[in-house]
Amino acid sequence: MDELSQKDRSSFNRNLIELALFSIVGAIAGGFREGLFNLAFARLNVQMRNELFGATMQQEICFFDLHQTGEITSWLTSDVMVVSNIISQNVSLFLRYLTKAFGICFFMIVLSWRLSMLVVIGLPILLMLSVLYGKYYKNLAKQVQDALADANNVAEETISCIKTVRSFANEESEAHIYSEQLKIMYDLNKKQVLALTIFTWGSRFLQIFLQVTTVFYGGYLVLIDKITSGDLISFFLYQVVLTDALQNISVTFTGLIQSIGVAEKIFDCMDNESTRKKNGTFIPETLTGEVTFKNVTFAYPARLQHKILNNASFTLNPGEITAIVGVSGSGKSSCVQLMENLYNPQAGEILLDGHPIQDYDYKYLHSKVAMVGQEPVLFARSIQENISYGLEECSINSIVQAALTAHAHEFITELKDGYNTETGEKGTKLSGGQKQRVAIARALVRDPQVLLLDEATSALDGENEYNILQELSKLKERCTILIVAHRLSTVKYAQKIIVISEGVIVERGSHEELMQRKGTYFRMVKMQVPALESDINNSS
């Protein structure tokens, strides 16, 4: 410093003070920035999860046919966390270093516009590198999250089916499959690291080149008295700070690109509007419960080339029990799902009391049409909460009465906590028959106008099935009942039987009428119930 002139020393001190003040102001602003950004992105995390879950709940059923549970939960957990955390960490830093870079550039231009132009020349090259790298990295980020979702699918499916896995001693195989999925993700991570390394080399070599060029050109400007040596030293210090800011901008830019790649899937789900018409407004004062299938042709959206129903027409009349029978895969359960308005047919229409089922108010329809499936799902809540599921107001008396009709009250009261007994995940604390009886009670407590039973008594013993069907027979006067069953001991309670084969209605009539025809139904009875040989002989 002794060799510097008084003017150089004064210039250097002034620039040093300005830099110090700029840094102090930046530190104070940085504290506010960190706090405000963390608060803002904590809200963003919650809002994204709420909106994504809400959007997922509004999707068509075929959406869940195409996307596995592990994939969807990965969006709600891993993907949202990646987006919110990376954005919260990187947007704040990106704005900080970007502001810092602009501020430093201003001071550099004030010191020497000639040296500043030299620095500016390298910025388009750095920008081009960033754009090329960003496109490649964004695609990799999406692939990484997809690979993680696949791994989550394996884990979720294996854990939820652990009893099956254990019974076949297949733990090692499932662990190997999970490991292979993680290996795919790791290979993509390596590509990310390689891309980041190349981008870092390119940007830093460019910055080193600019620094070296600045020293040589700045020295030349000092020799020809265009700037002072103090200004040159100050400019070089600014350039060091600018280089650090640009390096941090490139790092935060990488994080932002990753979050954009992951966020695309989330926003696609949020923006994906369901094409299923579910916002009908029709709410009739009375409902008789007549269901009509009119020339219905249906195929699942995931398998449009495979027709499940082909020009099917039939009617479920109020005041009677109708049964649909047929071999597995013939389209029985699909009829039930169409009545629930879970899918739309490709042709024809389903009418309820003469009105298209899609025209009914969504909540009204599902308060009047209740279904019990072969494998009913109970939630990890109490039995009382499971029976009253979906009802805003439901008295304990109504719950008990429904349980009595479903012959579930006796075993429920024998449990330690009675109706407050927790059922466990998917009802694992109850037996198959107990779950079915709770599910039947859940349907009956709604006092439905249309009751759909899809193999709803398949896990019950003969005595309990008989008792429940006897109770349901008493309900037929005030609601339409459809039974889908393989066991013909269940079908015999029906006044009308519809026989379906490969999506086509081939026979319909009472048990006695169909036995006399000696057609498809006759052959099913003969194969399934040898004990009914006397009935067969009598019909001959």
Image (tube, rainbow, N blue to C red):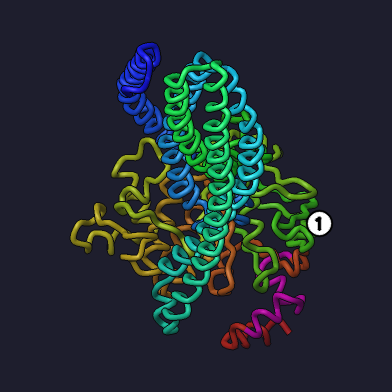
Q: Is residue 522 magenta?
A: yes
Label 1 sits on what residue type?
Answer: Asn
User: Image check: 301 left or right of 82?
Assistant: right
Residue at 40% from the left image edge and 46% from the top image edge: 389
Height in image: 499 above or below 47? below
Q: Quadrant of residue 378?
A: bottom left
Camera-side residue of 265 and 326? 265
How many numbered tags mark residues here?
A: 1
Outermost residue on the front side: it is 3
Please give the residue where the numbered disc 1 appears in the rendered image: 311
Residue 225 x %, y %:
54, 16
Instruction: Name which residue lies at 61% across and 40% down.
Output: 130
Q: Residues within 10 Å of mark 1 (few under 14, many from 20)?
A: some
Dot 1 falls on a residue whose secondary structure is strand
- Whether 40 is drawn above or below 386: the answer is above
Please say whether residue 373 is visible from this viewpoint: yes
Membership of 291 in magenta stretch:
no
For the residue pair 268 and 119, the one nearer the viewer reads as: 119
The residue closer to the viewer here, 308 or 463, is 308
**Foreground: 528 or 92?**
92
Q: Position of residue 520 (x, y in %)?
A: 74, 76
Q: Magenta segment, which residues?
A: 508-527
Quadrant of image for the N terminus = top left
Inspect this view and state whether residue 25 appears. no
The location of residue 353, given as percent across then percent down, is 67, 40
